[in-house]
């Protein structure tokens, strides 16, 4: 289900593209002409954005109707038809690019996510996204990660306390930062989980001595060191690996027993999937 604020985003995207009017369609397509177009898959992957496409179409023109044949999260193959869009021809042409831009981007994220998820299948490791998203598109991009089989890390700065290296460096150390976080939660009455990022085993030892955290982020640990770190934690709290983990290496990291692997590339480097809206 699409999150609140999506309709406002759609409105901005339509205004950006249409401006004072689609003068090409207004000039060449008779008023009142009706027709249909099909969403043609030109590259295999995981489909994402059908629900969004239906919302784009209906928000622009209530006379547009989308007939889906594939649902969000489905595996798609070259030549598949994901849906038909039926209604006024001018409206079909006016929503085409906005609809495709969203779907190609989101399907690319879902597809890359699924590749990471499949790479760690059979382990107990979960693939997470990060906050490295396109400004204003975070909710949609994280939705695409979910459709690809991954899980969402925090959505923003407001739904978790994540003490990163800059925080504990500026605060005077890891124990001080953890203590300050607990004092803040007690003072504000907030119920937030606490995660701490560490850069080496020495910093991990400080977390282990201090305790009172929900998860530790093991940043840029090589596989051998990560395995040692997971062993040291011994299940006392959740473990998360991050930093430069690729499709070629993710399986090795997952097999250390780490609980989560966060991958910024899911949203900042996913290539778009080739989709096309063709008149029928």
Image: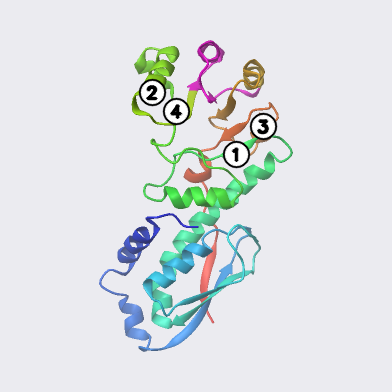
What residue does disc 1 label? Answer: 127
Q: Residue at x 63, y 42 (%)?
A: 116
Of the numbered discs 2 and 4, the one sitting upstream in the chain is 4
Of the numbered discs 3 and 2, the one sitting upstream in the chain is 2
Q: Residue at x 54, y 32 (%)?
A: 244
- Extreme left residue here? 20
Of the numbered discs 1 and 2, the one sitting upstream in the chain is 1
Of the numbered discs 3 and 4, the one sitting upstream in the chain is 4
Horizontal side of residue 253 vs 272, given as left or right: right
Is 257 within the magenta? no
Of the numbered discs 3 and 1, the one sitting upstream in the chain is 1
Residue 157 quadrant = top left
Residue 259 locus on image (x, y percent): 63, 30
Q: Tell me the crowding category of disc 2: few under 14, some 14 to 19, or many 20 or more residues within 10 angstroms, Cα based.
A: few
Residue 80 quadrant = bottom right
Residue 26 quadrant = bottom left
Question: Closer to us: mark 1 or mark 2?
Answer: 2
Marks 4 and 1 in Cβ contact (< 8 Å):
no
Marks 1 and 2 in Cβ contact (< 8 Å):
no
Horizontal side of residue 229 vs 99, given as left or right: right
Residue 100 locus on image (x, y percent): 47, 64
Marks 3 and 4 in Cβ contact (< 8 Å):
no
What residue does disc 3 label? Answer: 254
> Real-space Cα distance between discs 3 and 2?
35 Å
What residue does disc 4 label? Answer: 162
Q: Residue at x 44, y 31 (%)?
A: 191
> Real-space Cα distance between discs 4 and 1?
18 Å
Q: Residue at x 49, y 26 (%)?
A: 195
What residue does disc 2 label? Answer: 186
Question: Closer to us: mark 2 or mark 4?
Answer: 2
Q: What segment carries the magenta color?
A: 197-223
């Amino acid at each position: 289900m699409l999150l609140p604020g999506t309709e406002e985003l759609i409105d901005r995207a339509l205004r950006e593209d249409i401006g004072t009017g689609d003068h090409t369609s207004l000039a060449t397509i008779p008023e009142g002409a009706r027709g249909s177009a099909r969403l043609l898959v030109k590259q295999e992957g995981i489909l994402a954005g059908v629900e969004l496409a239906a919302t784009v179409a209906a928000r622009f023109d209530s006379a547009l109707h989308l007939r889906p044949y594939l649902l969000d999260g489905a595996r798609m193959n070259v030549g598949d038809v994901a849906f038909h869009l039926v209604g006024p021809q001018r409206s079909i042409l006016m929503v085409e690019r906005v609809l495709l831009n969203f779907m190609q981007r989101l399907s690319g994220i879902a597809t890359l996510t699924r590749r990471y998820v499949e790479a760690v299948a059979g382990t107990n490791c979960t693939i997470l996204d990060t906050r490295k998203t396109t400004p204003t598109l975070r909710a949609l991009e994280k939705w695409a990660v979910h459709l690809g089989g991954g899980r969402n890390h925090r959505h923003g700065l407001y739904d978790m306390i994540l003490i990163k290296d800059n925080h504990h460096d500026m605060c005077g150390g890891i124990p001080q930062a953890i203590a300050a976080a607990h004092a803040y939660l007690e003072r504000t009455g907030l119920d937030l989980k606490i995660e701490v990022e560490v850069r080496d085993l020495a910093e991990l030892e400080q977390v282990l001595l201090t305790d009172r955290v929900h998860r530790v982020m093991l940043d840029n640990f090589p596989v051998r060191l990560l395995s040692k770190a997971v062993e040291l934690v011994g299940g006392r709290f959740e473990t998360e690996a991050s930093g430069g983990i690729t499709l070629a290496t993710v399986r090795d990291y997952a097999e250390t027993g780490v609980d989560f692997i966060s991958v910024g590339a899911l949203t900042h480097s996913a290539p778009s999937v080739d989709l096309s809206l063709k008149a029928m």
